[in-house]
Image (cartoon, rainbow, N blue to C red):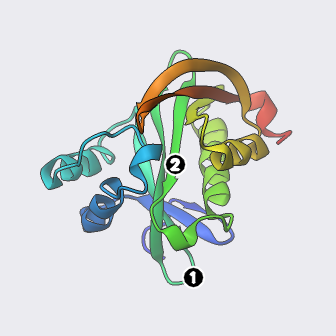
């Protein structure tokens, strides 16, 4: 294992590194992934490099590489963003860049590791996320983790010639043990 930070049964999370740049560039510019990301335009190499390096410097936001223990293969990224020290809250984000790694439970395992770290080690009280209404698979995964729907931002996302709702979900530290 290469520099593990959080270790699970089948995956571990480690800091992102400049060596991950080409892979991250491929994922962030993948037309099949773009509808599920906030990006609308291609990411330049210099912008992606700067983002990647910032992940190791910030105390308020970080992303980690999701790596399969079997073969040390980097398959995606997950992070906590906008960590607010007074409100003890953060925003959760995750994506699996490698298509063949999806729907195998790796994302759920990585999410559990990161949520556990957020609640137990960072002292967070609340973790929220935004998910597009058309992404039913992600919503089911978040519900299995214990996230609850808080509300809907109606027609808040324009993609593919039409507007889509954005679902706001959260989980509280007191709910985490019950999930």
Q: Which of marks 1 and 2 is nearer the N terminus?
A: 1
Please tell me whether mark 1 sits on a helix, a strand or a loop.
loop
Front one among 9 and 138: 138
Name the residue rendered at 45%, 34% in the picture.
81
Q: Nearer the viewer, mark 1 or mark 2?
A: 2
- Tell me residue 166's x, y (percent): 56, 27
Q: Quadrant of the C terminus?
A: top right
| Image height of 30 relative to 78, above or below | below
Tell me, for residue 85, which label it has, or none. none
Q: How far apart are marks 1 and 2 (CA)?
A: 20 Å
Is 41 left or right of 116, judged from the image as shown? Answer: left
Determine crowd level at label 1: few under 14, some 14-19, many 20+ residues with C-alpha closer than 10 A.
few
Position above or below: 162 against 13: above
Q: What element carries label 2?
A: strand
Residue located farthest toward the bottom when viewing the structure as drawn? 71
> Tag on residue 70?
1
Q: Name the residue under label 2.
A: 94
């Amino acid at each position: 294992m290469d520099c593990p930070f959080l270790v699970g049964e089948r995956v571990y999370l480690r800091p992102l590194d400049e060596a991950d740049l080409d892979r991250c560039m491929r994922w962030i510019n993948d037309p099949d992934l773009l509808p599920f990301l906030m990006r609308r335009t291609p990411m330049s190499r210099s912008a992606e490099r700067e983002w990647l390096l910032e992940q190791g410097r910030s105390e308020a936001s970080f992303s980690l590489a999701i790596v399969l223990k079997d073969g040390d293969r980097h398959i995606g990224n997950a992070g906590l963003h906008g960590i607010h020290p007074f409100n003890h809250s953060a925003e959760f984000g995750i994506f699996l860049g490698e298509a063949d790694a999806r729907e195998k439970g790796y994302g759920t395992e990585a999410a559990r590791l990161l949520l556990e770290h957020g609640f137990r080690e960072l002292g967070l009280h609340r973790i929220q996320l935004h998910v597009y209404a058309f992404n039913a698979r992600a919503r089911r995964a978040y519900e299995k983790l214990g996230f609850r729907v808080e509300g809907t931002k109606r027609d808040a996302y324009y993609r593919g010639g039409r507007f889509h709702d954005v679902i706001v979900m959260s989980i509280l530290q007191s709910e985490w043990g019950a999930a």
